[in-house]
């Protein structure tokens, strides 16, 4: 499992570099990220969260069981969700967002035990490349759209706490301060 960066590490606020080389190394990194995401019980993981400032994220929003409560269209089709998950998005750009917005509680693997309400567009359209460098277009809503927006924010150095309203951030202020202190102290104690 790769080490997941925590709040307080500078890499989390760095915009990722575009990926231009599509090779076995990129595929291996994405596989390791998926394994790390699963091990940490997450549904998404961005490269900044494993200490790499590049435009790569992985996600898996397929339900363990039951019905899918979101819609999606990949390249104009709707393949079964288990055929496209887990999914790697390389150099993703969100082109369109809905005017409709909804508020839901979010968490983040880089912010253990910290959750808060975040308002986001209900549906999006994102353009991205796969691990072979092929172009794709994805329209989605619900948790699928929310997860992509959260991860693409990471790739652009934006944290989910940046998207919270001031009241929510104020409520989490002490928890965030403690987490940052723990992170910074842990980094100082790491062997160089």
Image (spheres, rainbow, N blue to C red):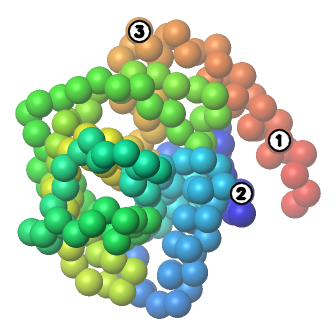
Dot 2 lies on which element? Answer: loop
Q: For this rendering, which residue is in front, 5 or 15?
A: 5
Where 167 falls versus 2 (above or below)?
above
- Which quadrant is home to the N terminus? bottom right
* Image disc number at residue 173: none
**Is residue 15 toward the left or the right of residue 45 in the image?**
left
Q: Residue at x 19, y 55 (%)?
A: 72
Residue 191 locus on image (x, y percent)? 91, 57
Q: Earlier in the sequence, mark 2 or mark 3?
A: 2
Give the Cα distance between marks 2 and 1: 13 Å
- Displayed quadrant of residue 178: top right
Q: Residue at x 37, y 65 (%)?
A: 82
Q: Which residue is mark 1?
A: 186
**Is residue 104 toward the left or the right of residue 123 in the image?**
right
* Image disc number at residue 167: 3
Residue 119 locus on image (x, y percent)? 29, 26
Dot 3 lies on which element? Answer: helix
- Displayed quadrant of residue 57: bottom left
Residue 146 locus on image (x, y percent)? 32, 42
Q: Earlier in the sequence, mark 2 or mark 1?
A: 2
Q: Which residue is mark 2?
A: 3
Residue lying furthest bottom: 23
- Which quadrant is home to the C terminus? bottom right
């Amino acid at each position: 499992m790769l080490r997941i960066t925590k709040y307080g590490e500078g890499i989390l606020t760095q915009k990722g570099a575009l990926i231009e080389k599509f090779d076995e190394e990129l595929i291996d990194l994405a596989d390791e990220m998926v394994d790390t995401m699963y091990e940490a019980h997450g549904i998404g993981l961005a490269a900044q969260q494993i200490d790499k400032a590049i435009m790569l994220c992985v996600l898996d929003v397929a339900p363990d069981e039951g019905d899918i409560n979101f819609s999606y269209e990949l390249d104009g089709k709707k393949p079964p969700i288990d055929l496209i998950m887990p999914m790697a998005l390389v150099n993703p750009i969100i082109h369109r967002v809905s005017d409709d917005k909804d508020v839901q509680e979010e968490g983040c693997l880089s912010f253990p035990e910290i959750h808060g309400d975040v308002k986001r567009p209900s549906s999006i359209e994102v353009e991205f490349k796969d691990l072979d460098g092929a172009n794709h277009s994805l329209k989605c809503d619900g948790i699928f759209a929310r997860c992509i927006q959260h991860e693409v924010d990471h790739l652009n150095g934006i944290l989910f706490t940046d998207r919270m309203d001031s009241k929510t951030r104020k409520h989490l202020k002490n928890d965030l301060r403690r987490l940052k202190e723990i992170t910074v102290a842990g980094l100082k104690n790491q062997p160089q």
